[in-house]
Amino acid sequence: MDRIRIRGGARLKGEIPISGAKNAALPLMAASLLTDAPLTLTNVPKLADVAFMADLLRQLGVSAEWQAGAGLGDGGRYRLQATDLAGTAADYDIVRKMRASFLVLGPLVARAGHAKVSLPGGCAIGARPVDLHLKALEALGARVELEDGYVIASAAGGLKGARIEFPFVSVGATENTLMAATLAQGETVLLNAAREPEIDDLGRCLIAMGARISGLGTARILIEGVSSLHAAEHAVMPDRIETGTFAIATAVAGGEIELTGTRAELIGAVIPLLESVGTEIAETNRGLSIHRNGVRPVSVDVATAPFPGFPTDLQAQFMALMATANGVSHIKETIFENRFMHVPELLRMGADIRVEGDMAVVTGVERLKGAPVMATDLRASVSLVLAGLAAEGETIVNRVYHLDRGFERLEEKFSRVGADIERQSV
Ligand code: EPZ
C-alpha cells in the first residue's frame, strides 16, 4: 500500500495546474445514461472515483473510451455512449464503495423507466441519507420501494414534471432530480436547489445535450422536459476544492504560487478568509496567484455552508492552517455531523484542538511536529498532507488510496513547487 512522506519547512514557489473537478465529472458521466447518443467529456481528471464510475457505467451497457491527457493537469477525454442499456441495477458492492454511484438512479428511471440501486448506507463523514433524492423522484411520478437495502424505482409511463421544494440544500438530490426531469413530461420547478458550481456545470452539459433548463446558479431551476437528448461535447469545470486546497497549502507553507486553469469565483468564500489570515490573492490571466511571506498566519473563525458559503470539503484543510496560526479559531461544520476525523490525527502532530459538538476550537501552536498519520476520507487525508508541509520533521500519511480518489497526482504537483514530498510503496 502506498504512503506519502513529507518533510516540512519548504516554502512553495511556482505554478500548479488545476485539474477538472471530480464532483462535476461524476454526475456528468452519469448523464450519459440519458441518451443513446455519445457524450464526450474533456478535462476529465484521472482519479480512482472517475475510473470507478466508468466501470459502473460499463456494467450498465455504456461504452466508455478513455484517452489520457498529455501532461500534468491536462485532463483526459471520455467518450461515453449508452446505445442500449445492458441493465438498470447498481449493486451494494458498488454503491458502498462510492456514494456518487447513486447518481445513476435518476437518469436510469428517466431513460429506462426502471432502476434498482443499492442504498449507500452511512460513511466516514456522517449518516448521509438519500431521502431527498427519493422524495423528488416520487414527486416526478416514480413508484419508489425499498427492498432488502435496495431502492427499486419505476415509472413505466415515464416521469411527469412537478414542483419540488427541497427542505434543505442537497447537491446530490438536486443533480439526480435535474437529470431525471430533463426527460419528464412537462415542466419541473426545483426550489431551494443547490447552487454549487458543479450543478451549473451539469446543467450546461444537459443543455448542450438538448435539455431545456433555466435558472442555473440560482435556488430556483426550471426544467421543461424533452422527449430525447442528443450527442454533445462538454469540458469539465476546474476543481474548486483542489483550487482551495492548494491556495490553503500556500498559506500553510508560505511562498508564492500561481494556480492555472482555474477561476477566483469558484472559491469566492475562501479568498477573503485567506486574505484576513495574511495571504495575498490576485486574479491572473491564467488563474489565481497566492502569496504569503514569512509572517505567521492569523486565526479567523469559519463556518461551512452550502455554496456560495465556505465549502465543507475545505474545512479540514482550513483547520490544518489554523493549527499553526496565531490565536484561536472556531471552525463550525454545519453540513456533515461527523466531519472532524482529522482532529485526532492533527493532535498527534502537536495541534491544540478541542471539539465541542459541531465546533472545533483550534488554538494555533508555533510549530506542528511530523508523525505517522492516516485518515478515513479524502479531504481529511489531504489536510494531513498540508499539516505535514508546516511540521517540523517527517510526516507519513498512510492510506493514500483516499487521496487517489480525488486528487490527481497530488505529490507531483506539490513537489514541482518545491515541497519535500514523495510517494512510497511499502
Ligand atoms: C456532495 O455530496 C459532494 N459529493 C461532497 O463531496 C460534498 O461534501 C457535499 O456535496 C456537500 O458539498 C459529490 O459531489 C460527489 P449533499 P452529497 O446531498 O451530494 C444531507 C468529497 O469529499 N442529506 O449536499 O452527498 C446529507 O447527509 C465529497 O468530494 C440528507 O439528509 O451532499 C448532508 O448532511 C464528500 N438527505 C447534507 O444533506 C438526502 O437525501 C448535504 O449533503 C441528501 C442529503
Image (spheres, rainbow, N blue to C red):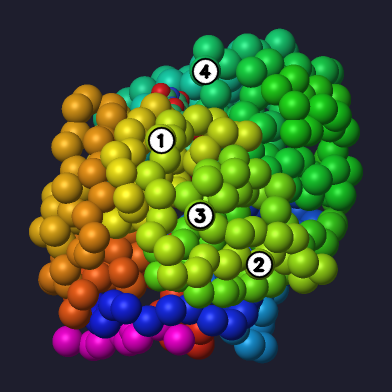
Q: Amino acid at mark 4?
A: Phe
* Mark toward the start of the polypeptide (4 vs 1): 4
Q: Position of residue 294 (x, y in %)?
A: 44, 70
Secondary structure of the residue carrying tag 4 is: loop
Secondary structure of the residue carrying tag 3 is: loop
User: Which mark, residue 289?
Assistant: 2
* Mark toward the start of the polypeptide (1 vs 2): 2
What is the spatial separation of the Cα atoms under label 3 and label 2, in whole angstroms?
14 Å
Q: Amino acid at mark 3?
A: Gly
What is the spatial separation of the Cα atoms under label 1 and label 3, in whole angstroms?
14 Å
Pick whichever, 42 or 181, lies toward us: 42
Of labels 2 and 4, the one closer to you: 2
Q: Position of residue 204 (x, y in %)?
A: 80, 45
* Mark toward the start of the polypeptide (1 vs 3): 3
What is the spatial separation of the Cα atoms under label 4 and label 1, in whole angstroms?
24 Å
Rate crowding at label 1 as few (under 14), some (14 to 19) or many (20 or more) other CA atoms within 10 Å: few
Region of the chain picked out in magenta, as a range: 418-426
**270 is higher (above) or lower (below) than 137:** below
What is the spatial separation of the Cα atoms under label 1 and label 2, in whole angstroms?
23 Å
Q: Amino acid at mark 1?
A: Asp
Pick whichever, 231 or 348, lies toward us: 348
Q: Position of residue 379 (x, y in %)?
A: 37, 54
Q: In which quadrant will I find the C terminus? A: bottom left
**42 is higher (above) or lower (below) than 245:** below
Pick whichever, 126 or 365, lies toward us: 365
The residue at which mark 4 appears reads as 168
Secondary structure of the residue carrying tag 1 is: loop
The residue at which mark 1 appears reads as 301
